[in-house]
Image: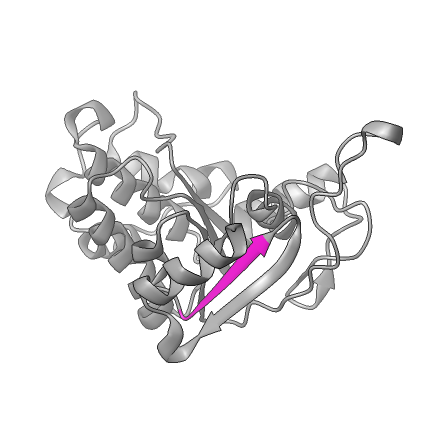
């Protein structure tokens, strides 16, 4: 719930859902449907006013900000529409940054493997300004995965990219699920992007309005369901 008294707005209402380990879920819905709020609550960025948020069998809803920060640094990865790279750091140092913030020494073999996975092994010494938008987002994906998180939350990760670069980023997220066993939860407005997921949740007015799985997870079906919810 946002606001107080007469100005209070319920952003999410009776939304209950499990994100199984090693799965890719896309969250969609019209503007104001609650999709970003759902992601923020699930990631411990925003506390729910009621209900709970379970990660690894523990309810994080009442945790202190210090404890939540430690959780996010060690068990959760983030990818945003804006790349949020540190301009003064090169690719390798940007990727390793979450480990350094958590007081952990980067594993050189792990770092090399990640840079190879995202196709940037030959760009490790480049700074963000020397990379394309698609390459910068691939750095952001590697950074999200470097601490071997249980779950990665991606908020419109392809929103600022052209179609080809967007496909590259989605393929990396898909590979994180299939190859590393990572759980990925992605907010997107694009049916083409959502079709990379195992499951699509559609929100409307803060409620879970539709859910697609299996063979129904196609761009055309997703677009049709999204249009029906928004009509």
Please give the range of residues in magenta.
198-203
Measured as percent of width and height from the top left, residue 159 is found at 33, 39
Q: Is residue 199 magenta?
A: yes
- Of residue 204 and residue 27, the one placed in the foreground of this image is 204
Q: Which quadrant holds the N terminus? A: top right
Measured as percent of width and height from the top left, residue 210 is found at 55, 65
Residue lying at 52% horizontally and 62% vertically, measured from the top left: 201
Residue lying at 72% horizontally and 63% vertically, measured from the top left: 58
Measured as percent of width and height from the top left, residue 116 is found at 18, 54
Residue lying at 59% horizontally and 46% vertically, measured from the top left: 33
- Which quadrant of the figure has residue 49? top right
Decide if residue 187 is in sight here. Answer: yes
Considering only vertical position in the picture, is 162 above or below 154?
above
Residue lying at 38% horizontally and 58% vertically, measured from the top left: 223
Furthest-right residue in view?
A: 5
Measured as percent of width and height from the top left, residue 111 is found at 28, 50
Magenta stretch secondary structure, dominant: strand
- Of residue 205 and residue 201, the one placed in the foreground of this image is 205
């Amino acid at each position: 719930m946002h606001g107080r008294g007469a100005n209070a707005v319920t952003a999410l209402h009776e939304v209950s859902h499990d994100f199984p380990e090693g799965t890719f879920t896309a969250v969609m819905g019209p503007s104001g449907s609650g999709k970003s709020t759902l992601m923020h609550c699930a990631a411990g960025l925003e506390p729910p006013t009621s209900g709970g948020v379970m990660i690894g069998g523990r309810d994080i809803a009442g945790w202190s900000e210090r404890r939540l920060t430690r959780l996010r640094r060690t068990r959760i990865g983030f990818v945003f529409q804006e790349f949020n790279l540190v301009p003064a750091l090169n690719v390798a140092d940007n990727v390793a940054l979450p480990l350094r913030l958590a007081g952990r020494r980067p594993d050189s073999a792990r770092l090399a493997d990640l840079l190879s996975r995202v196709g940037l092994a030959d760009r490790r010494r480049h700074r963000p300004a020397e990379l394309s938008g698609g390459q910068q987002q691939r750095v952001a994906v590697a950074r999200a995965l470097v601490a071997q998180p249980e779950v990665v939350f991606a908020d419109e990760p392809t929103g600022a990219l052209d179609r080809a670069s967007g496909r590259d980023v989605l393929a990396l997220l898909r590979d994180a699920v299939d190859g590393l066993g990572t759980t990925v939860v992605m907010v997107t407005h694009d049916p083409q992007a959502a079709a990379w997921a195992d499951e699509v949740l559609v929100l409307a007015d803060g409620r879970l309005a539709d859910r697609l799985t299996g063979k129904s997870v196609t761009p055309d079906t997703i677009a049709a369901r999204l249009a029906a919810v928004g009509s």
